[in-house]
Amino acid sequence: MTDETAPGEKGERIAKRLARAGICSRRDAERWIEEGRVSVNGKKLATPAFLVGPGDRIVVDGKPVAAAEKTRLWLYHKPRGLMTTHRDPEGRPTVFEKLPKEMPRVISVGRLDYNSEGLLLLTNDGALARKLELPATGWLRRYRVRVYGHPTDETLAVLQKGVSVDGVAYGPIHASVEKAQGDNTWLVVSLREGKNREVRRVMEHLGHQVSRLIRVAYGPFQLGTLPPEGVKEIPGKIVAEQTGDAITAGRTGARPKKPGGWAKAAPKPKRGQKPAARKK
C-alpha cells in the first residue's frame, strides 16, 4: 500500500484498522504512529495517512496485531455517577472501568452524561458507532424524564417544531406526560438528534428542571429489565439485521438507507387516458 490517500484507492486507514482490532482509539493510534511505534510490512510509519489491506502485516511495539474482530454490539445499563469516557481528568469513575474484564475494548454509541442513566450501546466497531449516532440514520432515542413542576401536553407540544436555546438549535422533540407524582411529573421524551445535554437544556428552557433522566430505548434496542451495570451482548444475527446498512455505510463511506417509508403512488392518468394496469 501507499502512504498517501488518493481517490479510488482501496484499503483502510491504519488508525481505523488499529481501532477495529480493539487495541486503541483512532486518536491513540495516530499518536503511536507519530512516536514511531507502528510498522507495516517491516516499514515504520511516519504518518497516519496510510492505507492497509487484508494481507498487510501490522506490528505495534514489536508485536503483531491480530485481525480485526467481527462487529459486535452490547446493551449496557448505565447507572448514575459514571462518566461515558475512557479517561476522566477529574478522576471520576467511568463506564469502561465497570465492564467485565473478559470484554474486548469497546466504545459507546453516543453518550449519557454523569447524572443520566439507562441504555447505552457499546460496540467494538468505531465506524458502526459513528453511523448509529448520526441523525441521518434515523434511529429514535426514547427517555423517561422526571421534571419539577407540572408541564402539560399543550406546553410540551411546542417542542415538536424544534426550539433554539442559547443559540443552539434543537430538532423536533416529542414529549408527553406519563404521570404526575407529587411536585414532579414523569414524561416520555423521544428525539433523533441527541445533542449534548439536549433533554435537560430544553426542559429548563420550558421552566422545568430535570431531576432524573433514563434512556429506555435506542433505535430498535430496549433497556427492558436489564439491571444497573448489567451487560448483554446482542446476537450477531440480530446485529446484522438491525444495523446491516449502517455497517456497510461505515465501511464503504456510503450513506445508510433511511428506515421505513411509504411506497410511491402510481402517477394519475391524464384526462382521457386509461389508467396503467397494475403489475401482478
Image (tube, rainbow, N blue to C red):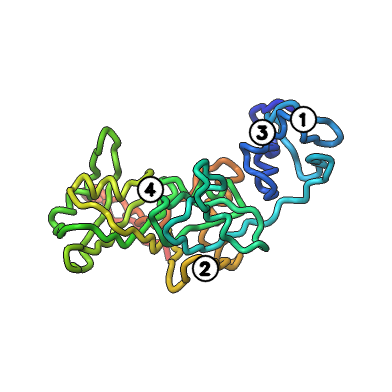
- Above or below, 173 against 26 in this view is below
Disc 2 is placed on an element classified as: loop
Name the spot of residue 92 as percent of width and height, x first: 50, 49
The residue sitting at 75% across, 41% down in the picture is 53
The residue to which callout 2 is attached is 230
Q: Amino acid at mark 4?
A: Gly
Q: Quadrant of the C terminus?
A: bottom left
Name the residue: 52% across, 68% down. Answer: 230
N-terminal of the pair, mark 3 or mark 4, is: 3
Residue 194: which disc? 4
Q: Nearer the observer, disc 4 or disc 2?
A: 2
Q: Secondary structure at mark 1?
A: loop
Closest to the observer, 136 or 114:
114
Name which of mark 1 and mark 4 comes first in the sequence: 1
Residue bearing the label numbered 1: 36
Disc 3 to disc 4, how far (Cα)? 28 Å
Per the image, the residue denoted by label 3 is 30
Q: Amino acid at mark 1?
A: Gly
Identify the residue shown where x is 58% and y is 61%: 99
Which comes before the other along the chain, label 3 or label 2? 3
Report how far apart the C-alphas of labels 3 and 2 lie in the structure: 33 Å
